[in-house]
Amino acid sequence: MTVTTSPRGDVAAPARAAGAGRPRRGPATWLRGGGLHSLVFLLPLLVIFGVFSWFPIVRAVIMSVQETNLVTDPTFVGLDNFRHVLADPLLWKAVQNTLYFAFLALLFGYPVPLVAAVLMREVRRGRGLYSALAYLPVVVPPVVAVLLWKFFYKGGPTGVFNTILGWVGLGPYPWLQDASWAMPSLVLAATWAGAGGTVIIYLAALTSVPAELYDASEVDGAGLWRKIWHVTLPQLRGVLFITLILQVIGTAQVFLEPYLFTGGGPNNATVTVLLLIYRYAFQNSLGGDYGAATALSLMLAAVLAVFSVLYFRLTRSWSTS
Amino acid sequence: MTLSSTARPAPASGARRRATPSDDGDRGALSAPDWRRPAVRWGMGGTHVLLLVLLVVVGLGPMLLLAKYAVTPTQDILRTPLALFPHGIAWENLERAWNDVQVSRYFMNTVWLALGSWAVQLVVATTGGYALSVLRPRYGKVVQALVLSTMFVPAVVLLVPLYLTILDPPLLGRSLVDSFWAVWLPAGASAFNVLLVQRFFDNLPREVFEAARVDGAGPYRLFWSIVLPMSKPILGVVSVFAVIAAWKDFLWPLLVLKDPEIQPLSVRLPAIEASTELGVFLAALAISTVLPVAMFLVFQRLFLRGAGLGGAVKG
């Protein structure tokens, strides 16, 4: 089997170039030196990544400046797709909603795992039980979690949450049916489903805080709060920065919750950017507007990339390592 | 923090050497003398009990409720969602979900999707990781950079072009839509897996490879008889992640598996929601949760270590 049979020869091409470029390494030497074996082992990776990762990424860029439908050949339309997306009034609503979701997710979801993990680190017996309980929601399939919570959120006095809140004289609340309640409800469910993973990450980081630091701070007479403030949190800085940016990147691409809980409603209050991309491409009665969908997804990716770079620039001086 | 140091947490060197009043290096912010103070003992102890109660309510509560609804008559669920079986137990919910709503079929579809994705991911990650880590061809660096670069591309960018690729894959001449391959093959393109496996291979002792080579083992033999058997821990992590990820996947199977007969649970559950009696539907949800939760309980250490690992790799 030769290099060129892989669907995307260009990926493997450096191999040949590197082999041919050196004077005393002809194809025969390459073969005898085990070059073929390496290629055989790399083949699954090259084919799978080539066809299902590298090629689609390149294709996304090309498609964003093309009009693509599945009937005729794609035509070049310049930046029309981008203009079309930017002129969509729903886009700004979606951007707003996504930012709101990200903000609420940080508000609900960022402090809780940290506090839980710091407390759990001090547990002396049965810490495994705590971790297991915290992580349990993460292993529930997300679709099941959403559908279950959708049932919990049922409006009216016989909804599960409304019944529980009714015991203490609260409610009934409209949850998903009200435009201003819908987004916080989505975030609450998403936080439940995701917080356990973050707790475990923090716990892992907390176990690697050197005991000497605590010992030393005790010699200096630090109490519990000072130890947490001056030792624990600074030691967690790196992880805290990373989980923050990962959470922002994750929430910017939220799809499952709005799609399954509310479908974007009520009154477009939960339409997110990803839901919009999905609608452009797959829910268009006139056939998929693939150009607009890829254009929007590239814009989202670009915004996230710029944000990440800025974030790392800003935090580099404070971060560990 | 590097992967190698978290894969098998070694006690911080030096922590054990020095005889400190704290409990041999494994201590948090509170020291052993701290714990002897009644204020700390009761304050922190009480906080821990409270935390445990909260975790049980929040983490386990919804699961217990789901388990209860799975065997509660629909009318009771609707009228008194939190009463404890006022009109008996409805075991038939489970049976009707399994048979009438065809959850059995969707369950098996999900199992096949998970197994196929697992196999593809394992093949790609181990062969690729072996080539990049052990065989190290000259162009390895380029391939590795290309693999890593995909980690920085958000998944959403791939959605539409990948869908069109499935509609018309290169060289194949027929659409992969409504074929399990449409889910299995793209699952293999996981840079995270390749990175994880490659880093593990990097840390295997080279002397063993040399010894095997001297004894006449070729690259295939080395891979199959030396490297793979030495890599069981990381293969376990990748396997568990692969199966769980496949079980969780929703959007992609929704797009490429149009035929309800071959759709997995995640896609079918929302579709049958409106047309299924509530008790039966919740029983279906419960059935879908059993396997992942059981896997978690069995491979708990693997899961939790893997989750911590995820943070370490990302960091």
Image (tube, coloured by chain):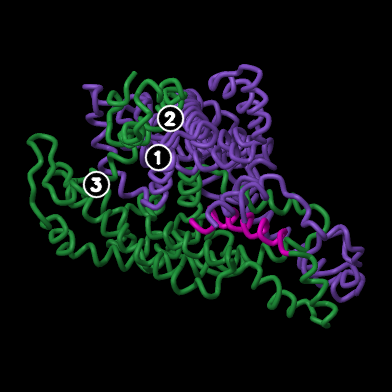
Q: Residues within 10 Å of mark 3 (few under 14, many from 20)?
A: many
Q: Earlier in the sequence, mark 3 or mark 2?
A: 2
In the picture, measured across the screen, residue A146 lies left or right of residue B258, that is right
Disc 1 + disc 2, Cβ < 8 Å: yes
Dot label at residue A42: 2
- Identify the secondary structure beneath mark 2: helix
Main secondary-structure element of the magenta-colored stretch? helix
Q: Farthest residue in the bottom direction? A: A221
- Please give the letter of the chain rendered in purple: B
Q: Is residue A123 above or below residue A137?
A: below
Q: Is residue A282 visible?
A: no
Which subunit holds the residue at mark 2?
A
Can you give x and y, in whole percent of width and height, for residue A208 in the image? 71, 59
User: How far apart, in angstroms, are the residues tagged by discs 1 and 3?
Assistant: 21 Å
Residue at the spot of label 1: B143
The magenta-colored residue range is A190-209
Residue at the spot of label 3: A60
Can you give x and y, in whole percent of width and height, for residue A126 in the image? 80, 52
Q: Quadrant of the C terminus of chain B?
A: bottom right
- Please give the letter of the chain rendered in green: A
Q: Residue at x 68, y 41 (%)?
A: B300
In the picture, measured across the screen, residue B53 lies left or right of residue A251, that is right
In the picture, measured across the screen, residue A168 lies left or right of residue A151, that is right
User: How far apart, in angstroms, are the residues tagged by discs 1 and 2?
Assistant: 9 Å
Mark 1 and mark 3, same subunit?
no
Residue type beneath disc 2 = Leu
Q: Residue at x 87, y 72 (%)?
A: B34
